[in-house]
Image (tube, rainbow, N blue to C red):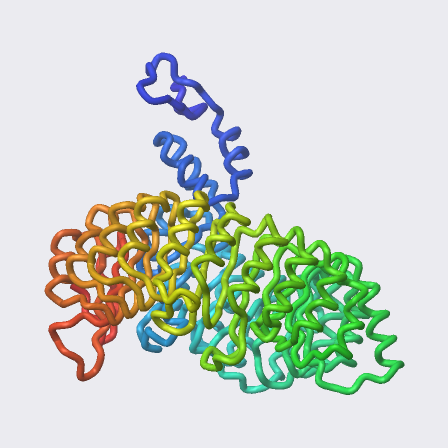
């Protein structure tokens, strides 16, 4: 019998074909089914042709980080048995209104192909995609086994589309709607869930703005006994929240409604009691309008929390300390800068296990508010396990960042956003070069870096010399010349994504990445010194890249004010609007 008919061959580099190791195909299928990482599965598929075929037939999830890097036809031909798809669309700088609304990233062409190739699709996770009500209805009607829909930072749909999902997805386990540009027509959509639906495990509508039908929500929560994540919007009051907690004490993650109401002793005791029975709760978020008087109701669950998201709660340092003093197990913490440096000192005092901290600005234009260098240093002293930080501040010093690097050398993500463009060290008036130099020298595991403040080419020389594991770099209002970007492009071998805005980088900088672009996913440059001629030369040199220029109305035709470069196997996209020029 032909060995290929009974098993799969695996040969090492330079292996003798006569000594090839044999593995039964069923063994490989079961082994590959245990590999969840897309990166690891991609590596497995490169071992040999047989492994490639077994991997492609056994893969159930695919993640597409750029919807234009590949076509849906190519995806479905490569992976015929996919049950779960993650699909990302617009560049990240669309979050800052730098990408026009009608730029593209429509999900419908993907759904059209999936309806034929993946009628058994169960899960779809979308980020920065254009999604219409018609697309949501199409999704609901064409995939009988569909179970999970997540939409983050998507746009184009309304609550009418949610009604279609609720009506037709009979086996729905997850509906996660977060930070979308949604036309909220009212809360009746919750009443469209069938009375016999009991499968829901995740329900998140925290960022919707209108009132919802509480009767419909209460009924839905009461019959979905496996519900583990519930994040409601600001229209749910404390009394209603208490009722929901009584119905769902099994929750693992909770997003509260508003705390904007006067509490009397009876309601305090009832809500405290409801929280005390939620013994599995490890994630808590929202806290809209919370004050020091409200906080005792959540104290019963603080001891088990590993993630606390207060990014919607403009609380002060005293309120934060009251929570943190009872939350010794926190691993992740998100806050706004109303907590001040005093609040961050409480973080350093009470959160020894903290690994991730994000500090968002409540008002980026108010220089009287916020956190400073002393708050960042305080956190680094008390949180030695910290490896991810996003920190918005008005001012910073080199000495502070150098201290932070010494205290927390295991940073993988360091995103420092000094909100005043080109702001120097406020004590010495020197550029912030040495600060970021310390980060890249000390934190050898660094994968993502966002730089800001007054920076010269020296900062980028440090990055190129020391940041050998860097994958994502974001730059704004920094640098002296093309040389800065050239240092990075020639020195960081693992770069996957580079985002640049308002920097003095031109054609020479753009073309310095010719060898790097072969392995990178994307490059974004806006309001730099790039010309159309430079973009054309890049397109000529690298035919497998899509080089797109977003033209501004009335702008200089010689300049390329917004450039998006990405690797693709699908060729130029067919749905580019008139203001997008593909070279």
Q: Is residue 91 left or right of residue 347?
A: left
| For residue 571, above or below residue 525 | above
Which quarter of the picture shows residue 222?
bottom right
| Residue 171 visible | no
Residue 203 position, x and y percent, is: 63, 68
Residue 466 position, x and y percent, is: 35, 44
| For residue 162, above or below residue 464 | below
Which quarter of the picture shows residue 266?
bottom right
Specify the farthest residue to the front. 428
Quadrant of the image containing the N terminus = top left
Q: Is residue 414 left or right of residue 203?
A: left
Residue 431 position, x and y percent, is: 34, 62
For image coordinates 54% across by 74% down, the residue present is: 370
Quadrant of the image containing the C terminus = bottom left
| Residue 21 visible | yes
From the viewer's side, name the closer residue of 426 and 171. Answer: 426
| For residue 343, above or below residue 238 | above
| For residue 265, above or below residue 483 | below
For image coordinates 35% across by 77% down, the residue present is: 101
Residue 21 position, x and y percent, is: 43, 18
Which quarter of the picture shows residue 425?
bottom left
* Number of marks in the rendered image: 0
From the viewer's side, name the closer residue of 80 and 559. Answer: 559
Specify the farthest residue to the top. 18
From the viewer's side, name the closer residue of 501 and 157. Answer: 501
For image coordinates 71% across by 80% down, the residue present is: 259
Q: Is residue 255 left or right of residue 37?
A: right
């Amino acid at each position: 019998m032909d060995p290929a008919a009974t098993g799969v061959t695996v040969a090492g580099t330079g292996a003798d074909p006569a000594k090839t190791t044999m593995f039964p195909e069923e063994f490989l299928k079961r082994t590959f089914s245990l590999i969840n990482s897309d990166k690891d599965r991609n590596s497995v598929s490169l071992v040999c042709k047989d492994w490639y075929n077994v991997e492609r037939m056994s893969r159930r999830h695919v993640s597409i980080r750029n919807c234009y890097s590949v076509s849906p036809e190519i995806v479905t031909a490569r992976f015929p048995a996919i049950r779960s798809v993650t699909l990302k669309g617009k560049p990240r700088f669309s979050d800052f209104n730098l990408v026009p609304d009608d730029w593209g990233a429509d999900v419908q062409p993907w759904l059209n192909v999936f309806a034929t190739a993946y009628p058994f699709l169960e899960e779809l996770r979308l980020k920065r995609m254009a999604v219409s009500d018609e697309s949501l209805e199409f999704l609901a009607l064409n995939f009988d086994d569909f179970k999970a829909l997540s939409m983050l930072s998507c746009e184009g749909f309304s609550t009418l589309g949610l009604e279609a999902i609720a009506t037709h997805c009979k086996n729905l386990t997850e509906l996660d709607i977060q930070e979308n540009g949604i036309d909220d027509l009212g809360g009746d959509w919750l009443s469209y869930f069938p009375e016999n639906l009991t499968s829901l495990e995740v329900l998140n509508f925290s960022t919707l703005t209108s009132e919802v039908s509480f009767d419909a929500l209460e009924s839905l929560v009461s019959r979905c006994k496996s519900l583990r994540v519930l994040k409601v919007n600001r229209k749910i009051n404390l009394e209603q929240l208490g009722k929901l907690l009584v119905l769902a004490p099994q929750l693992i993650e909770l997003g509260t409604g508003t705390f904007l109401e006067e509490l009397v002793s009876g309601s305090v005791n009832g809500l405290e009691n409801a929280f005390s029975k939620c013994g599995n709760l490890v994630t808590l978020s929202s806290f809209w309008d919370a004050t020091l008087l409200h906080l005792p109701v959540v104290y019963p669950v603080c001891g088990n929390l590993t993630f606390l998201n207060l990014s919607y709660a403009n609380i002060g340092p005293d309120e934060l300390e009251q929570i943190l003093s009872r939350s010794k197990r926190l691993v992740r913490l998100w806050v706004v800068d109303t907590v001040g440096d005093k609040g961050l000192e409480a973080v350093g005092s009470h959160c020894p296990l903290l690994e991730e901290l994000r500090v968002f600005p409540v008002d980026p234009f108010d220089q009287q508010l916020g956190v400073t260098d002393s708050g960042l240093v305080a956190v680094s002293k008390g949180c030695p396990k910290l490896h991810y930080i996003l920190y918005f501040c008005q001012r910073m010093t080199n000495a502070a960042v150098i201290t932070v690097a010494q205290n927390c050398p295991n940073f993988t993500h360091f995103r420092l956003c000094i909100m005043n463009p080109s702001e120097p060290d406020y004590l010495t008036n020197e550029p912030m070069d040495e600060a970021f130099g310390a980060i890249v020298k000390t934190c050898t595991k660094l994968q993502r870096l966002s730089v800001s403040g007054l920076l010269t080419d020296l900062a980028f020389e440090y990055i190129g010399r020391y940041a050998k594991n860097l994958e994502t770099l974001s730059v704004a209002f920094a640098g002296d010349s093309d040389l800065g970007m050239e240092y990075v492009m020639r020195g960081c071998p693992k770069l996957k994504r580079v985002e640049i805005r308002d920097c003095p980088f031109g054609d020479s900088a753009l073309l310095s990445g010719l060898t790097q672009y072969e392995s990178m996913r994307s490059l974004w440059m806006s309001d730099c010194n790039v010309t159309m001629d430079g973009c054309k030369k890049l397109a000529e040199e690298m035919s497998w890249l899509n080089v797109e220029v977003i033209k501004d109305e009335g702008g200089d035709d010689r300049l390329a004010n917004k450039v998006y470069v990405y690797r693709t196997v699908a060729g130029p996209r067919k749905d580019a609007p008139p203001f997008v020029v593909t070279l």
